[in-house]
Amino acid sequence: MARTMEPVAKKIFKGVLVVELLGVFGAYFLFSKMNTSQDFRQTMSKKFPFILEIYYKSIEQSGMYGVREQDLSYVR
C-alpha cells in the first residue's frame, strides 16, 4: 500500500515546492517594487496598509530610517 502512495506524495511535494517558490518570488517582487516606487507605496497604503506597515518595520530593523516620514510628507 505504501508503494501506491509514492507518486501521489511526490506530486504533493512538487506542488508545495512550487507554491513556496512562487511565494518567495512574489514577496521579493513586492518588496522590490515598494522599495523603488513611492507612488506604489501610496497605492499600497490605500489598498493594503498592513503590508506597508510590515515593509516599514522591516526596513527600519535593517537600519534604514526616514522612509515612513518621507512618505507621510509626500504629496502627489
Image (cartoon, rainbow, N blue to C red):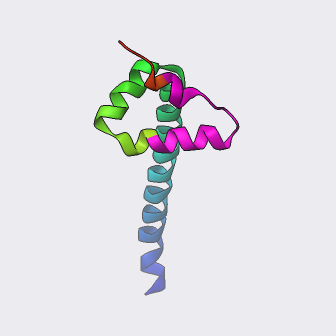
Image coordinates of residue 57 in percent, x first then y, are 56, 44
Asked whether 61 or 6 is in front, the reply is: 61
Residue 43 magenta: no
Question: In this view, which residue lies farthest toward the top?
Answer: 76
Image coordinates of residue 10 in percent, x first then y, are 48, 65
Decide if residue 23 is in sight here.
yes
Decide if residue 32 is in sight here.
no
Quadrant location of the N terminus in the rendered image: bottom left
Question: Residue at position x 50%, y 55% from top?
Answer: 17
Does residue 24 lie above or below 34 as drawn?
Answer: below
Question: Residue at position x 47%, y 50% from top?
Answer: 18
Q: Main secondary structure of the magenta part?
A: helix
Image coordinates of residue 49 in percent, x first then y, are 36, 40
Question: Residue at position x 33%, y 40% from top?
Answer: 48
Quadrant location of the C terminus in the rendered image: top left
Image coordinates of residue 20 in percent, x first then y, are 49, 52
Question: In this view, which residue lies farthest toward the left?
Answer: 47
Residue 55 magenta: yes
Q: How many numbered discs? A: 0
Horizontal side of 64 relative to 2 (left or right) equals right
Q: Specify the quadrant of the image occupied by residue 65.
A: top right
Asked whether 70 or 11 is in front, the reply is: 70
Does residue 59 lie above or below 67 as drawn?
Answer: below
Question: In this view, which residue lies farthest toward the right?
Answer: 63
Does residue 76 lie above or below 9 as drawn?
Answer: above
The magenta segment: 53-70
Asked whether 13 or 44 is in front, the reply is: 44
